[in-house]
Image (cartoon, grey):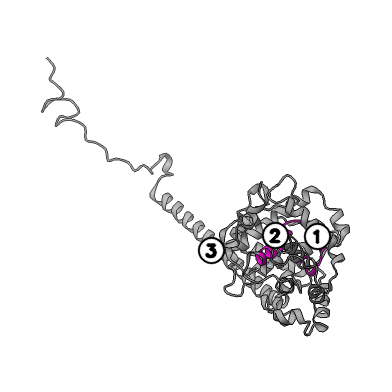
Amino acid sequence: MPKDSNKRGGTGPTGPYSKAKEPRKSQYQLRGGRGSDDFLLAGIESDRRASRVAKELRQQLQEQAQKVLKELQQSNAKDRDLALGDGAARLKSLAPDLTNQEMQDGHMMPQYPSLTLAHGQADKYAVSVEFLSNCGDAFKELHGYTVDRIFDGCSRMCVCKEALPLAVRLLDYYIHTLWAKGENVFHHNLVAVSMLYEEREPVVINDLVTLMNEVPMDKRDRTYTRIDFLRIEQHILMTTGMELPSSTYCAFSDRFAKAGGIPPDTKDHAFVQFLQELALTDYTFSQYKSNIISATAVYMTRKMWLLREGQPRHGEPSWTEALKRVTGVQKSQLTSCRDEMARLLRSLNRPHIAIGKQDACIAKWSTPANYNIASVFYD
């Protein structure tokens, strides 16, 4: 009877007479010697060399990118300083402020309106009617989207109030200049240079790049970097001759409102500002000079909230002698802009008839801090 191979002393593989086990081979020891230690070490060393080369290459590329970025920043800083000058302070220095009594008495008025009118006439950033007539619906939609992004960016980054009209006017002039040169008239992801100027804290470039990359991928050609942003800025400055608008409505609105009997820090004064900002969303208004837009906003505010029966200035002319003296503008010169502003108000929160995109503007002016002004015109 054969012995049980599983018992001690048996002939099976577990017995004392079983064949000794061979040492376990390394998983790297393959047939033909290709898994030998020498071969394995050589492969590891080759991988390490390749990794070092790749790391050095990445480092060189990063250093090169940093060098380009630094050069662009330095170059753009000089150009930006040349273009902006004193920034917001320059916009506020149009003429000395006058008291309400001086407005009514006409004190210093012979010099004042001529200065105001000269600044208004020097506003070269108003685009030509010919250009407007060549703008199709698709272009207006893209322009409206970009202005809405500028509105949103200015609101989220809390930049000074002068930056918003400066940015939009610069965008309009930039596009118009490219059109006049026969070049591509639209860079959809443009973020205007003036947002970099802020009298309290400068806007960080990375924040603006983030804003650019928030645009859906189907509306931009790539993911943008700081270098991309600086190159776009450089192109804007070169295209516009490194000049920013010498005047925006900020240079006129407070003075014009004061001449129209609209006290500061009131809902009526805020309505003047609202009309001017709403006009930025509609490309039609890019044909008007800044002083005309401000004067029209004051005229519309008086007509709607001050001159009707039971309102504070009922019985006054809609365009007083004080307004004529301070603005240097006759009522008849406001007709075209007035009609467009009335149309614009009728289109508020009605995207099917609005020319521009109003979302960010409505959001800003539907808050208690801004008297919920935009909500007044909802259905």
Question: Disc 3 versus disc 2: distance between alpha carbons?
Answer: 34 Å
| Label 3 SS | helix
Question: Disc 1 versus disc 3: distance between alpha carbons?
Answer: 64 Å
- Tag nearer the camera, 3 or 2: 2
Which disc number belongs to residue 338? 1
* Labelled pair 1, 3 in contact (Cβ < 8 Å): no
Residue 97 visible: no
Q: Quadrant of the N terminus?
A: top left
Earlier along the polypeptide chain: callout 1 or callout 2? 2
Give me the residue at 68% from left, 49% from top: 349
Question: Disc 1 versus disc 2: distance between alpha carbons?
Answer: 30 Å
- Tag nearer the camera, 1 or 3: 1
Residue 344 is situated, as x and y percent measured from the top left of the image, at: 75, 54
Instruction: Please give the range of residues in magenta.
Output: 268-293
The residue wearing badge 2 is 190
Disc 3 crowd, CA 10 A, few/some/many (<14, 14-19, 20+): few
The residue wearing badge 3 is 56
